[in-house]
Image (cartoon, grey):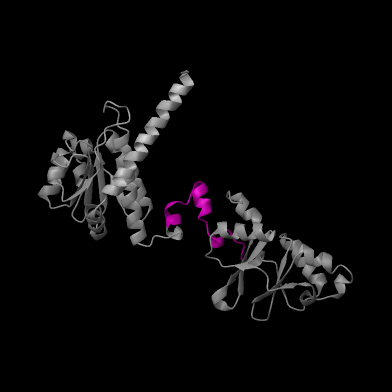
Amino acid sequence: MTDTEAFLRTARRVVTDEARALDVLADSLDEHFAEAVHLILKATGRIIISGIGKSGHIGHKIAATLASTGTPAYFVHPAEASHGDLGMVSKGDVVLAISNSGEAPELANLLAFTRRFGIPLIGLSSKPESTLMKQADVHLLIPSMGEACGFGMVPSISTTLTLAMGDALAIALMKYRDFRPEDFRAFHPGGKLGARLSTVRDLMHTGDALPLVAANTPMSDALIEISQKGFGVAGVTDAQGHLSGIITDGDLRRHMDGLLDKTTEQVMTANPTTITPDALAEEAVAIMNDRKITSLFVVDEAASGQALGLLHIHDCLRVGLG
């Protein structure tokens, strides 16, 4: 067997072992998981996550996932908790303590603090008879299935199961709270994810930037508006400001013969494709790609199609969509 074959064989065994362990975890979830969710939902404060070593690293991720999905949470290092950070834990909070063995000595002061002040404690461990689980109000038990290294020394299966349990908690809470993409966006304004969750309102052009002309405007004036605003289109509005049509480059080509003798209503495409300001910009990109157009007028459907803005494909490309 070559080195490459050996490496791949080991890697596939590790992934397979962890996948099997996740199946066991899924089958083992019971009313204790529901108790943990209910306990967190009743909290008037924050969810405090704590753990040492690899459990601590996983705890950081669980805290971040909870916080980004509508459950206020942060990580408290158990050693720092013993040197003043216990002051970060207060009435109304819920503590989620993580220890695969359930015997991490660094957690002792935090556990004692929760018992002394009546702060609900959720224990996450693979050992039901451990100190942590005996102290905890609610037990989240992960299957004890060894580790992928084969001799129980390298946290791998246990950390995968702990991470999955944290994800399950976060998403169960998110679903219960009806946490929506627009809520998610508030916690993820930056990067590619922030771009995907941008709304049309965030990117659209408004006010004097809008290329709008009234119905029955001479096409000579409409052409000036199209040229000055620089989007290659103009919206046609009625007396109440409702969008009734759009003039595009294609409309101009179709009516080239005698164009300057015509009015906007004679040239425009009626009932154009539009979008609402609260729609996701990603949805607008999909519409533009599907229709093979480069602009969408933004309208207020509650106000019978009042023209509010214009979104151009370049605006979406600038923030990483498209």
Across and down, in percent, residue 137 comes to 15, 51
Please tell me whether residue 259 is drawn above or below residue 108 in the rendered image.
below
Q: Position of residue 200 (x, y in %)?
A: 56, 61
Picture quadrant of residue 104: top left
Q: Is residue 78 magenta?
A: no
Residue lying furthest top in this view? 2
Residue 57 can be seen in this image: no
Q: Is residue 227 left or right of residue 322?
A: right
**Extreme left residue here?**
116
Residue at horizontal 33 percent and vertical 55 percent from the top: 172
Left or right: residue 47 versus residue 240 is left
Residue sitting nearer the eye, 138 or 267? 138
Q: Which residues are magenta?
A: 184-206
Q: Is residue 155 above or below residue 29?
A: above
Residue 146 location, x and y as percent?
26, 32
Q: Is residue 304 left or right of residue 237?
A: left
300 to 57, vertically: above or below: below
Position of residue 210 relative to residue 53, above or below, is below
Where residue 233 sits, quadrant-wise, is bottom right
